Image (tube, helix red, strand yellow):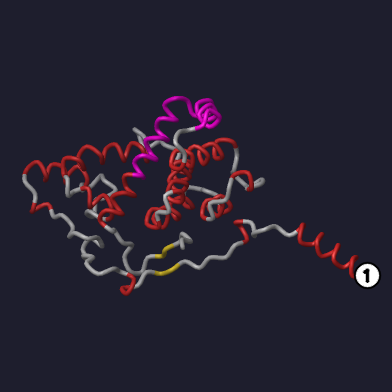
């Protein structure tokens, strides 16, 4: 009888997965409070240095400022976040901001935002960037990214363990694989390269690499200036 019970217990253990699927894990976002903000952070920028003002810049700097802050810009209300930190090097910001707009939205604003946000969220997770993830999770959801895919990325679940998820087709799998390999591996594997080239073409693959390079730069900006999410924001990436 004891042997029978032991055999049954072993069989049950073999049937139970080592960890719950990503979709079944529980996570409660943390709401940032004033106590979470480190010492030395300026409230006008939520970073280690104050926000740059247009009046403090010379003519070249003001020209760069106006490239970013203008009525047609997504920063029409003023500088904020990592892009605000770029203005500590105005000429760098002047050149990078148009590239960032192209990489995110395309030349005519026609880039598929669902796939763009998929790439951005994959990069944010691979970089363990709480700021980037928390800033873009809602954007991805609003762009139509399926909740199951967001959870897959949130928990950094391997694609081999993903199973059949709504919306997780070959293009989505390829983007996730490409982004993870670009960040974590010495180079893109031949298999990932060939899949991306076949699905997106050479220009599409270059744009994906450029988009991930851009968000790697954003991540370094956040880390260098210790840019914080402001009080009241939710931190939605489970990190140690």
Choose between 169 and 1: the one closer to the eye.
Answer: 1
Mark 1, residues whose alpha carbon is within 10 Å: few (<14), some, or many (≥20)?
Answer: few
Tell me: 219 left or right of 60.
right
Using the image, determine if residue 70 lies above or below residue 234: above
Picture residue at 8% right of the left edge, 53% below the top: 56
Q: Judge whether residue 206 is colored magenta.
A: yes
Coordinates of residue 136 in the picture (x, y in percent): 41, 52
Residue 48, given in percent of the width and then of the height, sits at 22, 60
**Secondary structure of the residue carrying numbered label 1:** loop
Direction left: furthest residue:
58
Q: Nearer the viewer, residue 236 or 105?
A: 236
**Magenta span contains residue 13:** no
Outermost residue on the front side: it is 3
- The image quadrant where one finds the N terminus is bottom right
Q: Residue at x 39, y 40 (%)?
A: 212
Question: Would you identify the image quadrant in which residue 209 lies?
Answer: top left
| Side of 86 relative to 180 (left or right) | left
Q: Is residue 72 left or right of residue 24?
A: left
Query: Which residues make up the magenta segment?
Result: 189-216
How many callouts does the rendering have?
1
Q: Quick check: 152 left or right of 85?
A: right
The picture places residue 154, in percent across and down from the top left corner, at 51, 55
Q: Main secondary structure of the magenta part?
A: helix
Q: Position of residue 44 (x, y in %)?
A: 21, 63
Closer to the camera, 12 or 204? Answer: 12
The residue wearing badge 1 is: 1
């Amino acid at each position: 009888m004891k042997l029978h019970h032991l055999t049954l217990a072993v069989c049950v253990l073999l049937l139970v997965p080592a960890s719950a699927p990503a979709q079944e894990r529980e996570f409660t976002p943390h709401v940032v409070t004033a106590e979470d903000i480190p010492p030395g952070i300026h409230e006008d920028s939520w970073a280690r240095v104050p926000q740059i003002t247009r009046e403090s810049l010379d003519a070249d700097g003001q020209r760069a400022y106006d490239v970013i802050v203008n009525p047609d810009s997504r920063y029409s209300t003023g500088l904020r976040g990592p892009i605000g930190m770029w203005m500590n090097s105005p000429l760098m910001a002047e050149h990078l901001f148009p590239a960032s707009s192209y990489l995110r939205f395309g030349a005519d604003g026609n880039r598929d935002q669902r796939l763009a946000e998929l790439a951005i969220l994959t990069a944010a997770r691979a970089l363990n960037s709480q700021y980037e993830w928390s800033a873009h999770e809602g954007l991805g959801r609003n762009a139509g990214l399926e909740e199951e895919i967001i959870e897959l990325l949130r928990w950094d679940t391997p694609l081999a363990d993903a199973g059949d998820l709504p919306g997780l087709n070959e293009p989505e799998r390829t983007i996730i694989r490409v982004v993870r390999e670009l960040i974590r591996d010495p180079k893109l594997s031949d298999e990932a390269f060939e899949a991306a080239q076949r699905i997106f073409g050479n220009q599409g693959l270059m744009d994906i690499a450029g988009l991930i390079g851009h968000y790697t730069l954003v991540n370094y900006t956040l880390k260098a200036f210790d840019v914080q999410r402001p009080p009241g924001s939710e931190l939605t990436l489970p990190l140690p």
